[in-house]
Amino acid sequence: MKRRFQQHPFQRNSMSFGNFLIISSLTLALLSALFMDVLILIISIAIALIALILFLIGYIKINKIKSSSIIPSTIESKIIAGSNESFNLIISNKERIKLYVKHPLKFCNIKPQPCYTNEPLILEISPKLAGIYETNWLEIESHEKVFTFSKKLPFETKLIVLPKVFPLIVRALELAMALGKTMHEIIQIQALGRGTEYAETREYLPGDDIKRLDWKATARLQRLMVKQYHQEYGGAVNLIYDMKSAGPITKDATAAEFLRMVIALAEQNIPFTITIVNEKLETFKFKDLKSAILTAINYALKAIEIDIGFLYELMEPHKETLMALMSMEKPMKGQLLDGDVIAITCLLGDLTWLIDIHESMKNGKLIVHVPFKAWLDSKSLEQAYMDYEHQAKIIKMLRKKGIIVESN
């Protein structure tokens, strides 16, 4: 899955002065020929000589740069989309030369600018989109008065940019393999807590509240017994995953937030349903947490643009589980429970389903997670501003209706 890259545009303001000198010299030469004016001809020749001298100085200097080497000559890295990493570089040369250095990948920046040979440089990498990126050069520029000269120096960059959701897939798989309780057992456990309605008496365990000792049962059985009470609240959650997105960056971010929420619920042994929003709404219920987590992973994988074969290589310990996921049958269909609803959505397209859920809720809260900046997939600055304004208006409207909106 290789991504095309676009080269950074260099600032070539100084080049315009060189062009100006050449054009001026030619213009004056034509005028001198037209008007037979020797003075204009002399000025034209003088400007041409100045331009030639400056050009030769720059040409000699750029040829000195040609003998430079970059240390190290290769960098390789695996990095998560949206994160940052930096490398130290040095451009080695016999002389100290002032340079401007650019990397062909847009998300790779070299600091400081300008820089000098034989002095440390920092290459900062901050990719937003997953993929495999490979380049084999850096462009070196020398700005000499009125002319700019450039050379490409050998430098290999090999980057594997993993989607944001990748580490969460690994964590979710590990969690699924470790879980054994059924949803029914979890609900039973959650139903017993610090409420006021008596449920049962059981043997004391280290950490139990002494205030809840059942003295009658303790005296009768000759061992410490404690009273257990029903919790005063329900523990089930309805998790909604809206798969619609503006592009690959927001798609990855939304899938990552969805899996992050699944992991958080599973780690707290909170049962949940999953509702998938695509062309229509489908709600699934599960017999155990393991099935719920594996279903969530399956839908997260469908959302991101990554070669599954490539993913198998990166996740060798979980390869068999991943292969089983691809042929996994859909879970049982169900309906939203009477409780809290957490929706992970890009707030794109028709949001009637979100308003309908809010208006039909009798108990619990509706919490909307917007896990990205709306403009990340915008094609232009103008489009980014429009997307930002659109998202801000929708969030304002939802909050006005009493819906809790959490956005980054």
Image (cartoon, rainbow, N blue to C red):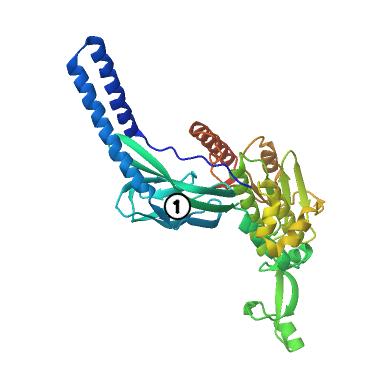
Q: Give the percent coordinates (x, y) of residue 190.
A: 71, 65
Q: Is residue 235 above or below residue 58?
A: below
Q: Residue at x 19, y 13 (%)?
A: 37
Whether residue 368 can be seen here: no
Q: Give the percent coordinates (x, y) of residue 394.
A: 57, 37
Q: Give the percent coordinates (x, y) of residue 194.
A: 66, 68
Q: Is residue 74 above or below residue 186?
A: above
Query: How many residues crowd mark 1 within 10 Å: few (<14), some (14–19), many (20+)?
Result: some
Q: Secondary structure at mark 1?
A: strand
Residue under numbered circle 1? 124
Whether residue 118 can be seen here: yes
Residue type (three-letter) at the residue carrying disc 1: Glu
Query: Furthest residue to the left?
Result: 39
Q: Give the percent coordinates (x, y) of residue 41.
A: 21, 19
Q: Residue at x 33, y 56 (%)?
A: 118
Decide if residue 112 is on the left or right side of residue 352.
Answer: left
